[in-house]
Image (tube, grey):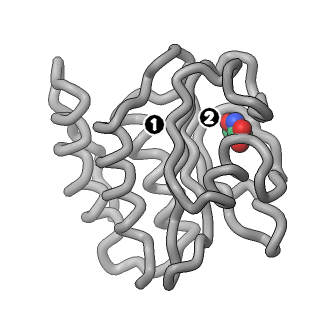
């Protein structure tokens, strides 16, 4: 059974991630269902770090991502490989930090309130099975600290 998450007050971003990761590990322990685990990761990240939107896009075909578990306002359901930030991350097989979404060519705006974004690929046996997408309603919200911790969190549900 899941308990309420506990977060340090007045903590730095790194301290918040440090407090969150063991709690996420606890939520995932004993549960193999990927959708359930992705759903709890989204909820924990949104509640713990206060992001505007947190969600997964899942590889649905060789050319297309489909919206998976998320927390936040409604979002576009399908993204083609190479399109937008998520499709670019999938094509390049790497994380992307976007300090200002208006300056990212081809950015897909699901909400006009989203100002900056970070996306992290989820791997399954060296293949990308999905993309974690985190949006902020502030410019320049993400840096290497977010990349490092979000990659650690995504590895908790990666295979291989
Ligand atoms: N901005 C993303 C689309 C997904 S939403 O941000 C939820 C992109 O350009 O791929």
Residue 137: which disc? none
- Cβ–Cβ below 8 Å for labels 2 and 1? yes
The picture places residue 80, in percent across and down from the top left corner, at 83, 55
Decide: is 23 above or below 108. below
Q: Quadrant of the N terminus?
A: bottom left
Left or right: 132 as drawn, with respect to 108 = left
Label 2: element kind:
loop
For the residue pair 46 and 97, the one nearer the viewer reads as 97
Q: Say which residue appears at 68% left-offset and 64% top-offset.
A: 58
For the residue pair 154 and 63, the one nearer the viewer reads as 63
For the residue pair 29 and 146, the one nearer the viewer reads as 146
Decide: is 55 above or below 46. below
The picture places residue 36, in percent across and down from the top left corner, at 52, 67
Residue 142 figure quarter:
top left
Q: Say which residue appears at 40% left-offset and 77% top-offset.
A: 31
- Residue at mark 2: C-beta within 8 A of ligand 1: yes
Name the quadrant where ligand 1 sits. Answer: top right
Residue 13 figure quarter:
top left
Badge 2 or badge 1: first in the primary sequence = 1
The residue carrying mark 2 is 72
The residue carrying mark 1 is 46
Q: CA distance from mark 2 to mark 1?
A: 8 Å
């Amino acid at each position: 059974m899941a308990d309420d998450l506990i977060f340090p007050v007045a903590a730095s971003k790194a301290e918040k991630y440090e407090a969150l990761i063991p709690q996420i590990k606890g939520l995932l322990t004993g549960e193999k269902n990927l959708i359930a685990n992705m759903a709890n990761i989204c909820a924990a990240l949104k509640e713990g770090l206060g992001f505007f939107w947190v969600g997964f896009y899942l590889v649905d075909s060789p050319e297309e991502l489909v919206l998976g578990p998320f927390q936040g306002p409604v979002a576009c359901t399908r993204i083609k490989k190479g399109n937008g930030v998520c499709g670019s991350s999938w094509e390049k097989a790497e994380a992307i930090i976007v300090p200002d979404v208006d300056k990212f060519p081809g950015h897909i705006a699901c909400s006009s309130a989203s100002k900056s974004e970070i996306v992290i690929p989820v791997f399954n046996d060296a293949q990308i099975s999905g993309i974690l997408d985190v949006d902020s309603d502030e410019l320049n919200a993400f840096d290497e600290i977010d990349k490092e911790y979000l990659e650690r969190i995504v590895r908790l549900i990666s295979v291989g």
